[in-house]
Image: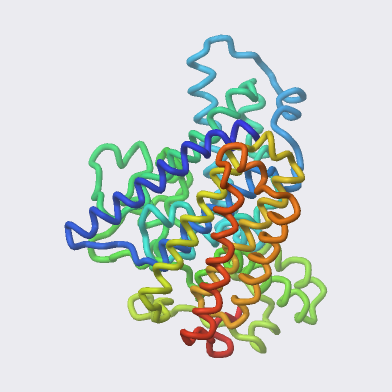
Amino acid sequence: METYATALLYAIPFFVGLVLFEVIYGYFVKNQKHNVMDTVSSLSSGLTNVVKDSLGLGVVLVTYPYLLEHLALMEIQTTWVVWVLGFLTLDFAGYWNHRLSHRINFFWNQHVIHHSSEEFNLACALRQSISNLLVYFPLLMIPAALLGVPHQVVAILGPLHLFAQFWYHTQHIGKMGWLEYIIITPSQHRVHHAINPEYIDKNLGQIFSFWDRMFGTFQEELEEVPPQYGVLKPANTWNPILINFQHLWRLIKDAWRTQSYMDKLRIWFMPTGWRPADVKKKYPIQIIDDVYNFQKFMPEASSALKGYSIYQLLANTGLMLFMFYNYTEIGFNGLLLFGVFIFIGIYGYTSLMDKASYAIWIELFRALAGLLLIYFTGDWFGLNSYLFFGNYLVGIYFLSTIVGAIYFAYFENTSLDKGQLAV
């Protein structure tokens, strides 16, 4: 996990820089594909994901080294062959993992966050899950284990394979000629993120596009069918933590409410969106019928709220980068506590973005807890070792969040209509 944290220390500024470049490019060509609140929400989702993954939180059903030890039929000696086979088998597993996430109710919950943005841009690529707490992906790596691909190779290729899926989340690149037959391109991935009936659940590949052609899930982007983005059951919130568990909460409620014991069990494994007939009739859920005429989630937000949201995003990103930089010295228990502060912070300021009336209490609780921690320890997880005034800097940040929370709660009307954030 320390190696992963070190990689993120360099990867995160790089990805954020590319998002900023896309924003600037869109501004100058007068074809902006970002809006402030959506982009802050997307980047905040990315923060929650990397914190969760860097801490190794989850239940692992089986590890790849275990499968390799018990299933390997051969040992490949040629170095370049190992790396090629490793990447191909990893991408093959990624295709089927992606397909399961789109086709099975329970697994959709771990992927819905990625599709929840009603925009399509580099920022939405960073909307990654924190609800994938059941780690089953190594089971899909059985072909790699049979071929004897070393686990060290998979450990190196895994982050590279994930990072390589970032670039094609853009509307500024058109079709790419012969490359369309080999790799996933922006055009193909625009289809994948679209909610048009022609495009739903298509183009599930991650790096190579030939898996979709082989297994019947390929769909070309059509000029006469412009992609419309989002999910058919809109999230209607900027809070990425809420989005991560909305679908799961609906499944739990449906399983509880249905009178059929069989439906209570099979709802988890049925196709995505399936609901018991009795529950579907008694508790209807609004679904987008006309993808070309629906109201995007875009509550009014003042320039001050937008600016404060950006400030909070930058501050929490800075805190997280220090967490990765000082990963070993902080220790596991300290990392868990640090992670809690980041999660609560993101929950708090994205709730303010939603104009939720309870957001102020989350912000005040976190700020006071942070100030008390600094008071009793005289430091912020070792920051004073690098900046002699580090604890004062973080203390000023917490004080600013108290001021911000009070201002947006009482000087701007941030109360939501009841039900606006209903899950």
User: Looking at the image, which residue is at 37% across and 66% down?
Assistant: 36
Q: Position of residue 60 (x, y in %)?
A: 74, 43
Question: Is residue 19 found left or right of 387 in the rendered image?
Answer: left
Where 24 sits versus 214, above or below? below
Camera-side residue of 13 and 203: 13
Camera sees residue 195: no
Where 402 sits versus 112, above or below? below
Report the quarter where the N terminus lies.
top right
Q: Position of residue 127 (x, y in %)?
A: 50, 56
Please identify the residue farthest to the front as the structure is shown. Answer: 388
Camera-side residue of 80 and 267: 80
Please identify the residue farthest to the top as the structure is shown. Answer: 77
Camera-side residue of 100 and 112: 112
Please identify the residue farthest to the left as the structure is shown. Answer: 29
User: Looking at the image, which residue is at 60% across and 76% down?
Assistant: 360
Where 281 sits versus 308, above or below? below
Q: Quadrant of residue 102?
A: bottom right
Camera sees residue 151: yes
Q: Position of residue 239 (x, y in %)?
A: 55, 68
Q: Position of residue 399 (x, y in %)?
A: 57, 66
Report the quarter where the C terminus lies.
bottom right
User: Looking at the image, which residue is at 63% across and 34% down?
Assistant: 141
